[in-house]
Structures are given as C-alpha cells and as structure tokens.
Amino acid sequence: MEDVAGFSPFALERYFAKYEFTAPHLGCCSDCEPLTMKELIAMADADSLNKWENLSLGYTESNGLPELRDEVASMYNATISQGENDGWEVDKDNVFVVAPEEGIYITVRAVLQKGDHVVFPSPCYQSMSEIAKSIGCVLNSWEQETDKQGALTHFSVDRLRKLVTKDTKLVIVNFPHNPTGAMVSRKQWAEIMEICRENGCYLLSDEMYWGLEYNPQETQLIPACKIYDKAISLSGMSKSLALPGLRIGWLVTQDNDLLRSLKTLKDYTTICPPAPSEILSLMALRARDRIIARNLEIIGAGLEAAKVFFAKHSDKFYFTPPVAGTICFPRLLTGCTYEFCTNLAEKHGIVLLPSSVYGLPHDPQCFRLGLGRRNVPSILSMLDKVITN
C-alpha cells in the first residue's frame, strides 16, 4: 500500500483488520474482556443512570462532560500515595476529553513542527512515531533492551539520557508498555521526568494501561502530568476499563497554553465527544474499582494459562511474563513469526500479531498475545494441539 498524505499504512491495524471480525479465535487482543451494556448499566449509580435515561442526543461540550472530567481528575488525585512526590492536584479544567487516537494526533501536531527532534519508544503503537515522521521531524528510537535469548526485556534510562538533548522537542513514553508489558521503576520514572526537565522538552506519556499493574502498591507510577509541568498524560476507557467501543479517552496537562492549542485542533477533528459514550464512561469511572478488579482477575487467569503453555513448549518459545497490562510478547525460537502467525490465522482461525507489524530495525521474531480476554486459556489449548500435532 502507498503512503497517504505523508502517512505510511498502519501495519498493525491493517493486519488486525484482516482477521478481527472474520477469524473465530482472537488471541492478540490488547483490551480487557469488553463489558456488555447490561453489565455496565447494572453498575451505574443513581445519578449516572438518571443522566442516561434522560439523555439528549444533541451536541456536547467540546472539552467533555464536566462531571466526566471531574471524575477523571478525582481518579488522578486518588493515586497511590508516594509521599512528598504525589505532585500537582489535577483540576477538571485541565482534563480534555478526546478519542484516544485523536489525543495522540492532536498532541503531536500541537507540539511539533518540521525539523523538531523527537524521541519515541521502540516497539510502539505506530502513530506514536508516524505522525511526527509525516510532519518532517527528526526521530530517534528509544529501543527496548534484549536479553541473551533475544527477547525484549526492559527500557534503559541511561540509553534515553543519551538520546535526549537541548534540541529535543518531544519525548514519548508508554508504561505499562504495549506490547511487552514492561515497566520502569519509580526511581527510573523520576529520572525520566528529570531528563525532560533538564532539556526543557515536552513529554507525551501514553498511560492507557495505567491501573492494570499486577502489584500496584509497588509498581504503579504517578501519572506524568502530576509531576512534570510539560507532560501530557493520555489515558481512556479502552484498556483498563474494558470499554474500547466507547472511543473515549482524555489528555491531562498542567500546560494551559498547550491545552488551548489542543482545543483549536480538536475543532478540526471530532469537535465534541459523543453524548452516549460520555455518560457510559461516567458510569464506568464511578465503578472503576470493581471493573479493574474484574479485569485483573481475568488477566490473572490468562497469565497463568500462558505460563503453563510456555513452560510446556520452552523448546519452541521464550516467554518473559509481563508485570502489568493485558499483553505479552513471546519470542519464537526458530522460524519467522509472520509466517507462523499467518499460518495460524489462515488454517486454524487463531490470530496472533507478528512483531513485523511494529517496523523494528531488527525483527525479534516475537508475537503479541493478549491476556485480558476470557478465551485465552481455550485459545492456548487450541494452539497446543496445533503445534503438538
């Protein structure tokens, strides 16, 4: 496929789209088991249920429903305390409701101009680098480290420090990481903030999986927007709250000048959020503890099934368990993962996502396996039969 308006085809989305609604066994989903409308309505408090039943399907506030923004601010201000480093108190006026992909697009467009220097994580969701590339920016990838088995493991802050300079305009990070489930420590997180602060650059922090840490008391990070005044935190309903179909997310930043720029750009994209999605999001945020507990239980079952499967087939795969999120990135020890995944999809209806779609300089021959759906144990059982026979 050819580039369109300076954008290369989105390899991950094009591969996924080929099978998402036709193959019977999706094993690479990056979300949690989606809630049904019935399940969500059953969790609704009286206020949000009343708003739902009396909802006007008209235009909405461009910034987002005030009650929804207030709920997001309250969630950020209730993060696990880390003492004196808890940071800025989020106000609803600094919360800007967007579609998640829209949030990436308008942030990058608001911050960058042709020739600006950008540092982004690798691997990453393609739009994290592609939008800057389309503008004509100078990009450097913060590559994930590998172990002796060739598997992707962790991100080195020392490597990042060498990449970021006084000429850097934007650093992009993503923790918990997609697709490996990797994290940085709280000490390393503080060092990342300091690197950006010393060089005066913006920081776009993709926090879509925030809340899905397996040991949050020890590993959950303070949202970047709370501890760095030029940070923009991106999150939403799609991953941690199991409602990707609502297409609701948000940007949070202390930088009011940047917020004004974001609002200007949104007038050229979606203009305002969909009214039904906002009310349904409000319901879910008010029931977030129940939803996240449910999601972590499902992920836990998927992770345990994965550990058993990969222990049994350690001669074929190398598995590094994630520490957060809904996905992992096992390595195929022999052969090509693109051929492996395509064969599974075409012949057996099992969809895994090959690492080739991430456009890495050197393909690590990994594949994305989702852990957040209830069908993960059964899919791994089917995969066991395929590779055993």
Image: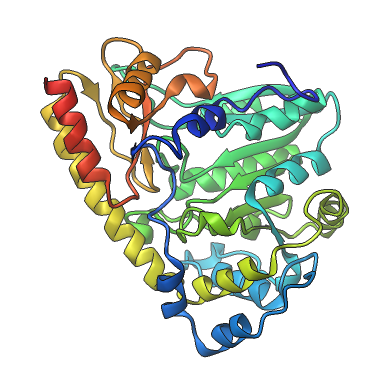
Residue drawn at x 49%, y 29% is 18
Q: Is residue 261 left or right of residue 343?
A: right
- Residue farthest top in this picture: 335
Counting the numbered discs, the total is 0
Tell me if residue 197 comes above or below residue 5 in the rendering. Answer: below
Quarter of the view holding residue 267: bottom right
State the residue at coordinates (54%, 59%): 237
What residue is rendered at 67% in x and 53% in y? 99
Q: Position of residue 50 (x, y in %)?
A: 59, 88
Q: Is residue 344 left or right of residue 159?
A: left
In the rendered image, residue 73, in percent from the top left (x then y), is placed at 63, 71
Q: Nearer the viewer, residue 307 or 77?
A: 307
Say left or right for 317 vs 181.
left
Is residue 77 in view? no
- Examine the rendered structure and indicate whether residue 324 appears above or below residue 142: below
- Quarter of the rendering occupied by the C terminus: top left
Counting from the top left corner in percent of width and height, residue 290 is at: 38, 72
Q: Nearer the viewer, residue 379 or 290?
A: 379
Task: State which quarter of the image contains the N terminus.
Answer: top right
Residue positioned 80% across, 39% down in the render? 109
* Along the line of sight, the residue nearer the viewer: 331 or 36: 36
Rendered image quadrant of residue 39: bottom left
Residue 97 image point, x, y percent: 70, 61
Is residue 284 in view? yes
